[in-house]
Image (spheres, rainbow, N blue to C red):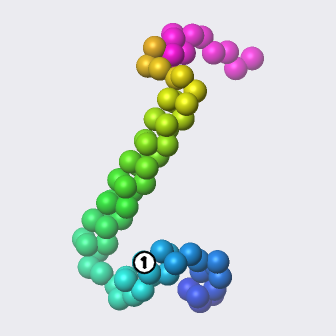
Amino acid sequence: MEAKELIPDSLNEQQLLMLRLFKNPLPESLFNQIRQLAVKLLALELDETIEKWEAENGITEEYYEKLGKQHFSSN
């Protein structure tokens, strides 16, 4: 199976730009640095999303502490 077959037809403009940017292979160390940075950026975005959800739903640290002290049974 060719690599082209693995890429869906529905790539957005950002995905296409990233593919063009990294058209040529990078040294493994640079690729790993870029991958780590991408993961950090996605984690920051996830943190912001969770914080927004917590604020919208009145979820506090005390709520999490209370949950942590409860006993959850799988029965």
Secondary structure, mark 1, is: helix
Counting from the top left corner in percent of width and height, residue 64 is at: 49, 19
* Quarter of the image that includes the N terminus: bottom right
Instruction: Find out whether residue 68 is within the magenta segment.
Output: yes
Can you say whether 70 is above or below 52 in the image? above
Q: Is residue 48 above or below residue 5?
A: above
**Which residue position holds label 1?**
18
Would you identify the image quadrant in which residue 25 lies?
bottom left
Residue 72 percent coordinates (x, y): 63, 15
Q: Residue at x 48, y 74 (%)?
A: 14
- In the depicted view, which residue is nearer to us: 51 or 9? 51
Residue 75 as seen in the image, left or right of residue 31: right
Residue 65 can be seen, yes or no: no
Residue 37 sits in which quadrant? bottom left
Question: Does the magenta run of residues contain 10?
Answer: no
On the picture, is 75 further left or further right than 40? right
Looking at the rendering, the stretch of residues picked out in magenta corresponds to 63-75
Residue type for callout 1 = Met
Percent x, y of residue 57: 58, 27
Residue 26 placed where, x, y %? 30, 81
Residue at image position (46%, 14%) is 62
The one of 55 and 17 positioned closer to us in this rendering: 55
